[in-house]
Amino acid sequence: MIEVLSVWYNEQFLAPYFLKHYEWADSIRIFVDSDTNDNTRAILSDHNVYWEDFDMHGGLDDWEKALHLTKEYSETHCDWVIVVDADEFIYHRTMPVPDYLKVARGRLVTVIFHEVYRHITDGDLDPSLPPLYQRRHGSTKVWGETWEDNVKPCVMRAGQDIKLGIGVHRLGLESSVVVTSTLGPYLYGVHWRHADPCFSVDRMLNGRWGRQSPANIERYGEMKTTREAILAECKAHETDPEVL
């Protein structure tokens, strides 16, 4: 059995795409930031998923989020646990993910993510269709500035001594499990952070950058971006190659 865990804030746009993509999971558990004020809860209530509110006490706190997901991972009754954000869609290149995990060896599967963007040939997003191939073009640079930027050890066999790190880009220092790969040697994923300006501008400005907790600001410094910067990034990737 496979369980998907995620923490959401105001994800009414991405929710239908996420739920359709992961409909092969045996269990989906969503923890809704208690400050959420859009239709996320109503959408989740219309689907066969478990959800509950989660209070992060004063805005987005990446460490508090990691601690909560670690706790939920430790209490799962499934065989495999996938920890992803609402804009992260995992896949295998030659077989369904459940088939891959049936034969996967080891305790942890590493996922390589590509950033995807709206290509000049792409149509509007359609929530009635599977999301993966609606946005197939993106950056071929998967490593980012460091290995951890686009690689996540976020598919875990249950019952391991795993403590998640911030953003699940790495495991916590106290984990006994090291970051290793299994067959393949990886799963792959697409990151929809900027998959379309129709949602990414508002989501990034108000959902991420606009609600940093005091703990996050102390941790990273004050993070800022602008509508113009997000649109310029999307424009710069309009002719990217296929990455799926």
Image: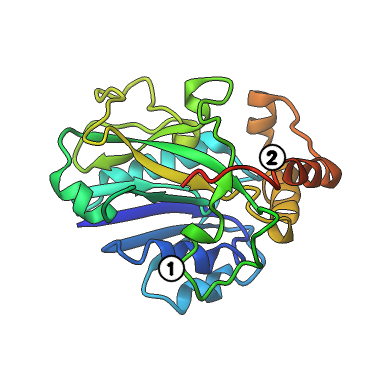
Name the residue at the right extreme: 228
Circle number at residue 20? 1
Does residue 208 lie above or below 147 as drawn?
Answer: below
Which quarter of the picture shows residue 187?
top left
Residue 170, position in %: x, y?
42, 27
Amino acid type for the residue under numbered disc 2? Gln
**Front-most of residues 187 and 73:** 187
Q: Which mark is residue 150?
A: none
- Give the mark toward the camera: 2 or 1: 1
| Res 42 → quadrant | bottom right
Return the disc, 2 or 1, that comes first in the chain's sequence.
Answer: 1
Q: Residue furthest bottom?
A: 46
Q: Quadrant of the N terminus?
A: bottom left
Task: Decide: few, some or many residues near mark 1? Use Cα within 10 Å; few <14, some 14-19, many ≥20.
Answer: some
Separation (CA) of disc 2 from disc 1: 29 Å
Across and down, in percent, residue 144 comes to 56, 26
Is 37 drawn above or below residue 136 in the view shown? below
Q: Amino acid at mark 1?
A: Lys
**Residue that appears at 46% across and 67% down:** 130
Give x and y (percent) for residue 217. 70, 30
Q: Residues within 10 Å of mark 2 (few under 14, many from 20)?
A: many
Q: How is the image coloured?
A: rainbow
Comparing 220 with 93, the one in front is 93
Q: Residue 205: give x, y in percent of width and height.
A: 76, 48
Which residue corresponds to the image point at 69% horizontal and 40% vertical from the top-left?
212
Q: Which residue is mark 2?
A: 212
In the rendered view, tell whether residue 164 sits above or below residue 221. below
Residue 217 in the figure: left or right of residue 111: right
Q: Secondary structure at mark 1?
A: helix
Mark 2 lies on a secondary structure that is loop
